[in-house]
Amino acid sequence: MTEAIAIVALSGRALAQSARRGGMRSTVLDMFADKDTQAVADRVVRLVQNNQVLNSLSLQRCLQNLPETVARRGLVYGAGLDRLTDVIAAWGERYPVYGNCQEVVRCANNPRQFFALLAALNIPFPETCFAPPRKNISDWLVKKQCSSGGGHVQQFDPLQHYNSDIYFQKFVNGTAVSLLFLADGHRIQTVGFNTQWVTGQKKKPFQYQGAINRVNLSSDQRMEILDYAEKLTAVLNLKGLNTLDCVASADNINVLELNPRPGATLELYDQDVTTGLLRQHIEACQGKLPANDNRFLSPVRAHQIIYAVSPVLIPDGFHWPDWASDRPAGGQIIAAGCPICSVTADGEVEATVTEKLQARRQFLLAQLQQSRRVA
């Protein structure tokens, strides 16, 4: 295997597994240092976080402490670095960084700039404004800049004061879908279309809960989303793995956001790519798209995050099933609202996979509850 590549993300587990699949070693800097991340990485460093946001100073120190051989091999960043583009850009002045440049990430996370770009490209998006709406206030959502995962999205409350880093967007009925694609700066290649799920919980109703790699879209709707991804790639010079999030209804496709880095749905396809999608991401950043289209290779596959409703103590020696991922070490206390782990399921029939996923979720929660009682 080659020298270890550095992976930085809120959770680096899926990227580290993909690295291993592609014959690469990895050093992971993330917020969780889960057991299954440690099982595939050479080294895992747990970054300091504040309210599930990575700490800039902690990241800088950990990057500075990377061995020179790892630094020269390069760095891949995932979710959670949207507010830390300056740290990654500074690092990229000395060492390779495989991903989109600082200006692209900033554009995708600046709603004024991003939605102005969509408008210029004739790409539809929900009505958006930067001052509190005055009419039909129940139809509006509040979103925070430089945030991911949907936990920041709330219903607009006219009685609440909002900071300057938020914007207002009209709610659009439809199904949340996404396109995961590779780009070489000019062209794109589809990895897959996905249907996304949210928790629907009162405090964080739009928080990402999981996805399945199947969508109920017509061929025209798929082509429409692909056209939007191609336009954005051409203008922004997108590279590597990217995700375009949309809301689809019978009549319209509305773009919600562009995530210009490897996303959570990577793991719904990675097992079916011999070299792993991380290697394809790196090669795409170097201007080389894979020769084969990945889109027809994957069986039905889904994942779902389990969030703690109340504080959960992970028992020492707890047995994690093979279909559970993002496994915390024993003795950790998972705070309410934070992710405990993820569950996965696959198969040939979509309905069967979703049923299996829910059954596994309930089984794991019951096992954790039983372990608490025994302890």
Image: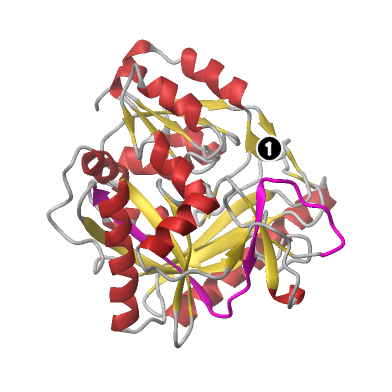
Residue sitting at x 24%, y 69%: 296
Query: Residue 326 at x, y = what percent?
Result: 55, 46
One can see residue 179 in this view? no
Disc 1 secondary structure class: loop
Residue sitting at x 47%, y 74%: 353
Q: Quadrant of the C terminus?
A: top right
User: Is the residue 161 above or below the residue 102 in the image?
Assistant: below
Q: Nearer the viewer, residue 319 or 355?
A: 355
Residue sitting at x 28%, y 46%: 237
Query: Residue 305 at x, y = what percent?
Result: 60, 57
Query: Residue 355 at x, y = what percent?
Result: 55, 77
In the rendered image, residue 350 lying in the magenta stretch gets the answer no
Q: Quadrant of residue 190?
A: bottom left
Q: State which region is magenta.
A: 158-184
Task: Give the residue at the far left of this rendering.
Answer: 291
Question: In the picture provided, is 108 more to the left or to the right than 281?
Answer: right
Q: Quadrant of residue 169?
A: bottom right
